[in-house]
């Protein structure tokens, strides 16, 4: 090897070392969410975004949100449509409206229509200084669109969990807070999220499809059971399944929410004997067969802890709080 080649080799070796040490995450050697227990996880453990409710708001702010929610509920009734959205500038100016009429196509949800109307009418392309109102919580598609559009504040009436579990209305079964909590992939700060404004009125307008199984909106609810003895509520969602080495493999995401009024410290969970190929957020003690939280093991009232795993097949591991 001549001297120049040697110098280049040393230079590239140093560069490679400095690059490798720059960050734990190396896309060439890491696969998001698939770290084994012995690997250091580079997957950012993400909690769902906090969702404020009317009880958390100053009465004068709540009055503004209620007035604007009442307006889109009135439009919804007038046009006999369920999902209506509106957009306001933060200076209070009403900008535009969006009604989900199913036209021109199935993804023309109220939020998307309102965004497109604002662009067409006012040339707005980024919504950093805007608030969006919607009669029903944004679906996974719209929540993502609202993050992309950079909305400062998002306000809804009826919760997705109620749409699916009480109203039997078809939707992607995901709390939008799951998506809003992942804002850091796009922007510096999370949107301010307020759910349940005029909830009773909005729920009443959505009504129920549970007794209308022939409706195109009907879906049979598959809702997580709540353990009556524990304040910890566990929800799990299968995000994807694929074929790998001749078998089906699935990825699940879950949340553990403290629905009680007392802080839960170091909770443990029993499970079915199924074992994941990899898991983040939870860790099992093979001697006791009990699972515990992988990170800071405290869940405050109202807080949510996230976990996820990859497993052979398509079945969830049924976790149950031990207390
Ligand atoms: Zn939507």
Image (spheres, rainbow, N blue to C red):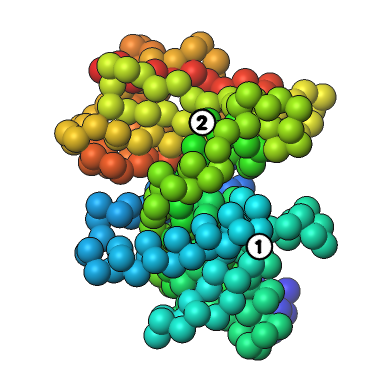
Q: Residue furthest front?
A: 78
- CB within 8 Å, label 2 to label 1: no
- Judge from the rendering whether residue 81 lies leftward or rightward of residue 230; answer left or right: right
* Cβ at disc 2 under 8 Å from ligand 1: no
Q: Would you place residue 313 above or below residue 74 in this image?
A: above
Residue displayed at 32% across by 17% down: 228
Q: Secondary structure at mark 1?
A: strand
Q: Which residue is mark 1?
A: 99
Q: Residue furthest left?
A: 262
Whether residue 235 can be seen here: yes
Residue displayed at 53% across by 30% down: 165
Q: Which residue is mark 2?
A: 166
Whether residue 36 can be seen here: no
Q: Quadrant of the rendered structure where residue 229 is?
A: top left
- Relative image position of residue 38 (x, y in whole percent): 46, 35
Q: Which class describes the residues within 10 Å of circle 1: few (<14), some (14-19), or many (20+)?
A: many
- Relative image position of residue 256 (x, y in whole percent): 38, 34
For the residue pair 112 and 288, the one nearer the viewer reads as: 112
Quadrant the N terminus occupies: bottom right
Q: Would you place residue 142 above or below residue 246 in this image?
A: below
Which of the two discs, 2 and 1, labels the residue nearer the N terminus?
Answer: 1
Q: Secondary structure at mark 2?
A: loop
Residue displayed at 65% across by 53% down: 81
């Amino acid at each position: 090897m001549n001297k120049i080649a040697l110098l280049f080799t040393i230079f590239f070796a140093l560069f490679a070392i400095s690059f490798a040490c720059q960050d734990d995450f190396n896309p060439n050697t890491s696969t998001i969410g698939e770290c084994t227990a012995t690997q250091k996880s580079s997957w950012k453990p993400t909690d769902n975004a906090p969702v404020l409710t009317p009880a958390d708001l100053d009465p004068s702010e709540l009055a503004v949100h209620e007035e604007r929610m009442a307006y889109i509920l009135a439009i919804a009734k007038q046009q006999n449509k369920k999902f209506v959205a509106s957009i306001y500038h933060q200076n209070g100016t009403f900008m535009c409206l969006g009604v989900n009429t199913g036209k021109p196509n199935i993804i023309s949800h109220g939020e998307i229509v309102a965004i497109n109307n604002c662009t067409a009418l006012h040339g707005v392309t980024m919504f950093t200084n805007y608030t969006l109102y919607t009669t029903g919580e944004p679906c996974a598609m719209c929540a993502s669109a609202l993050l992309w559009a950079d909305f400062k504040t998002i306000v809804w009436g009826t919760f997705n969990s109620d749409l699916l579990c009480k109203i039997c209305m078809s939707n992607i079964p995901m709390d939008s807070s799951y998506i809003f909590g992942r804002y850091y992939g796009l922007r510096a700060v999370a949107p301010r999220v307020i759910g349940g404004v005029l909830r009773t009125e909005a729920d009443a307008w959505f009504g129920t499809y549970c007794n209308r199984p022939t409706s195109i909106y009907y879906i049979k609810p598959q809702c997580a059971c709540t353990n009556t003895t524990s304040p910890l509520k566990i929800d799990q969602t299968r995000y994807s399944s694929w074929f790998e080495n001749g078998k089906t493999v699935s990825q699940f995401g879950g949340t553990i929410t403290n629905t009680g009024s007392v802080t839960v410290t170091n909770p443990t969970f029993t499970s079915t004997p199924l074992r994941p190929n990899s898991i983040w957020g939870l860790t099992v003690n093979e001697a006791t067969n009990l699972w515990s939280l992988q990170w800071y093991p405290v869940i405050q009232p109202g807080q949510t802890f996230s976990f996820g795993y990859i497993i052979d097949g398509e079945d969830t591991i049924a976790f149950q709080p031990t207390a």
